[in-house]
Amino acid sequence: MTKRPVVIGIAGGSCSGKTSVTRAIYDVFRDHSVVVIEQDYYYKDQSHMTFDERLLTNYDHPLAFDTDLLIEHVHSLIDYKAVKKPVYDYVQHTRSEEVIDVEPKDVIIVEGILVLEDERLRDLMDIKLFVDTDSDLRIIRRIQRDIKERGRTADSVIDQYLSAVRPMHNMFIEPTKRYADVIIPEGGDNNVAIDLMVTKIKTILETGANL
């Protein structure tokens, strides 16, 4: 049987702890062979739009992502072919001219708020995880992150959360929970769930067993 990478999808709401779960799994398999494909890198190119038009983009809607390119790249990595991952410029609100060369690995982690939304992408995954964290904790984390890392005011973060992030979560992200094989409450703090995932992945890699 032809060798195939293990593809893991990690979804969940904004600031739910997806990155922490991804990092925990990555750290275990760092020496084995693992690559992370972040959905955030695959926002659509908006260079054809004016800057003011770009500011109106709803980044929590499925149509904000170039999902076709993301699926194409996951297909290539599964076939052990290198890809050029795009980079998004959050200052100019469009895709950068820079790309990142990504080599194929034995473990592929696809991480993002809506990675379980598209059936074509789900069908490529061996393990589908949903990181489930209470909304009050997620908004607190988002306020802290955006003030510290993105220079925003608390009021602007709250306004965006109420006008776009929260309704999009309820409409598009939360419903994808039903596609998950495993739901992980509290993200990176749930060591038991992460340990179980790590054990399962190790078993697949060592034995080549099908899920």
Image (cartoon, rainbow, N blue to C red):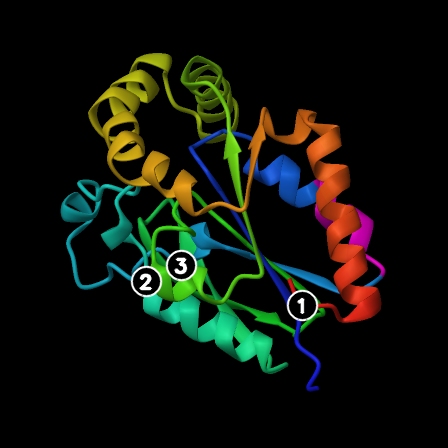
Q: Is residue 32 above or below residue 187?
A: below
Q: Which residue is mark 2?
A: 66
Nearest to the observer: residue 205 or residue 24: 205
Number of the front mark, 2 or 1: 1
Residue 118: name its quadrant: bottom left
Residue 98 horizontal/vertical position (percent): 48, 66
Residue at x 25%, y 20% (from the top left corner): 162
Residue extending farthest to the front is 210
Q: CA distance from mark 1 to mark 3?
A: 29 Å
Residue 99 horizontal/vertical position (percent): 50, 68
Residue at x 45%, y 23% (from the top left corner): 142
The stretch in magenta equals 24-31
Of the numbered discs 2 and 3, the one sitting upstream in the chain is 3
Q: Amino acid at mark 1?
A: Asn
Of the numbered discs 1 and 3, the one sitting upstream in the chain is 3
User: 10 Å neighbourhood of mark 1: few (<14), some, or many (≥20)?
Assistant: few
Number of the front mark, 1 or 3: 1
| SS at badge 2 | loop
Residue 70: name its quadrant: bottom left
Q: Which residue is mark 3?
A: 42
Q: Amino acid at mark 2?
A: Asp
The answer to whether residue 25 is magenta is yes
